[in-house]
Image (cartoon, grey):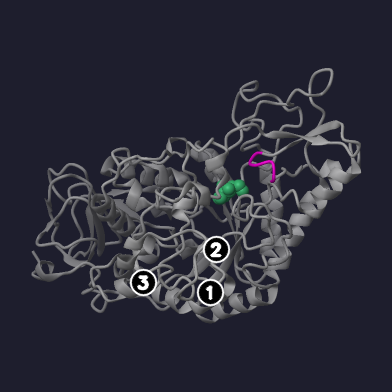
Amino acid sequence: MDSDVLTRQPGENAGADAVASRPAPSTADPLWWRSAVIYQVYVRSFADGNGDGTGDLAGVRTRLGYLKDLGVDAIWFNPWYPSPMADGGYDVEDYRDIHPQFGTLAEAEALIAEALALGIRTIIDVVPNHISEQHPWFQAALAAGPGSPDRERFWFHPGTGENGDGIPTHWVSSFQGETWTRTTNPDGTPGEWYLHMFTPEQPDLNWNHPDVRREHEEILRFWFDRGVAGVRIDSAALLIKDPDLPEVGEKEGPGQHPTEDRDELHDVYRSWRAVADAYPGTRVLVGEIWVPDIDRFTAYLRPDEMHTAFNFDFLARPWGAASFRDSISQTLAAHAPVGAPSTWVLSNHDVTRPVTRYGREDTAFAFLKKRFGVPTDPELGRDRARAAALLVAALPGSLYIYQGDELGLPEVEDLPRDLIEDPMHYRSGGIDPGRDGCRVPLPWSGDEAPFGFGAAGTRAWLPQPAAWSALTVETQEADPRSTLLLYRSALRLRRELIELADAPLAWWDDAVPGARDVLAFRRGDGFACVLNAGEDPVALPPGEVLLTSTEVDGSLPPNSAAWLRLQTPPVSTTNTPESSAPRG
Ligand code: GLC
């Protein structure tokens, strides 16, 4: 056993100087997106530059140095457009401007340029499935009445029955409840119904209409012209609906669901790819695709469609070596034939924070399981979230980090009910806590709220727990064992180690002979990651310890992970299809 192991502290990095390292990344690299680290900024909750309690672009601009120090390659901004905020900004009123609470278009342009000067690209959220009811198109459609061309950009439909008061279909909203709302005619009589897969404030667009297609391609150009390096495509598998409006289950077979994952979508994304490819540098398309069939999922990643899509299979998996290995193997195998890199995502603005989720008895994620009062063990969750962070950072592909996960923030589960804004909460009749618990403003510094999120004495739009004084950036920067410093070390090593750039993954089956619930893999000959997901310590395989998620003393404790520099290639490995994946 290397004597170094005995003294290594979490977050410390002994090996970085000693190992094969790769050159600093260049913003001109056309393949930047294949192994990029992308940090998700939920603007409302990142940093408040003007003291109104809501995060803004001015706040982000003052914190770019933090993101550079963290070691990210790009920022993905949640929607920053003018919006009535019926769904946290996913109800867009104007796709070519910035919400006045967040700043101005000129500030966005400055931010994009300033970030790029630090080597950080900008990815923005586009929301093509639906718009805000306040968008001029929808307002015009309401005013123009039934049968008008303005209504054809949406899904207006008469109701069933003699008086048209029956709902056109019984499709269920992703936010629970019905997906059609009846309009009122100008003379006050009940009118047609319109479709909304989310809230009634988010009418769905009709993607069979040429205006809708043209408009979104122009929106892409608008932002690419401003230096945006890519787009995250919201609800990307929902855009196309079956115009016959069948009920779910009336038709069978892949691509025949009335509202999800329809084959016609691929044409839309081929056109988008052509728009992106007309720009210099690589402008990436990243899909939010919740499609359970992995082959249907990777079909969106063929070379003339999207570049990558979020790997929600891994995010939803329960804690455990077998469950993680199964997901990783399947993911790599399914991506290899299309030549796309996989993505690794532990959380985002829609799901329960990993620290809380991994501390529960049931560690799998599912929207419909979210309830108040489910117990969690915060220490266990923290240990596992740190170990999972090392695991995903060592996998081939791109890595997404949701703001605050690098601080080990827990889900805030005791928000005052009257302050919760998320429609998932109130549309469930208050049963589902909703998603605001992972959207609480970040703690930066100081001993009391707003913890540097805004100026002292200001009040953040959601209250931060008093205990977050121990989790501020300031506190964690001074603590070598902090989660923040663990993330910084991991991202620095990820950049430096040549194997983590593009070496294939090979499972290392006998890394810890006889151990159950251990996951180990190698990248190239010289790097290994070992996760102990079990309940007992296991012996660390021989090698120089580069980084660990917890203190090690020769053995790897339960719920922890280690990165190792191997002196000699291990004897037994299983190669994955990733080893033969084409590039480009
Ligand atoms: C996506 C977003 C989510 C939003 C929904 C409707 O799933 O991530 O936050 O509520 O789309 O736009």
SS for callout 2? helix
Residue 184 belongs to magenta span? no
Tag of residue 59: 1
Tag of residue 473: 3
Name the foreground residue: 442 vs 522: 442
Residue that lies at the very extreme toward the top in this rendered image: 162
Residue 551 vertical placement versus 496 (above, below): above
Disc 1 to disc 3, how far (Cα)? 15 Å
Residue 337 vertical placement versus 183 (above, below): below
Disc 1 to disc 2, how far (Cα)? 10 Å
The stretch in magenta equals 197-201
Residue 521 in view, yes or no: yes
Task: Give the amino acid at mark 1.
Answer: Gly
Disc 2 to disc 3, how far (Cα)? 18 Å
Task: Give the amino acid at mark 2.
Answer: Arg
Whole-percent x and y of residue 521? Answer: 27, 53
Q: Are marks 1 and 3 in contact (CB under 8 Å)?
A: no
Density class for disc 1 (Cα within 10 Å; few <14, some 14-19, many ≥20) is many
Label 2 sits on residue:
44
SS for callout 3? helix
Task: Give the amino acid at mark 3.
Answer: Val
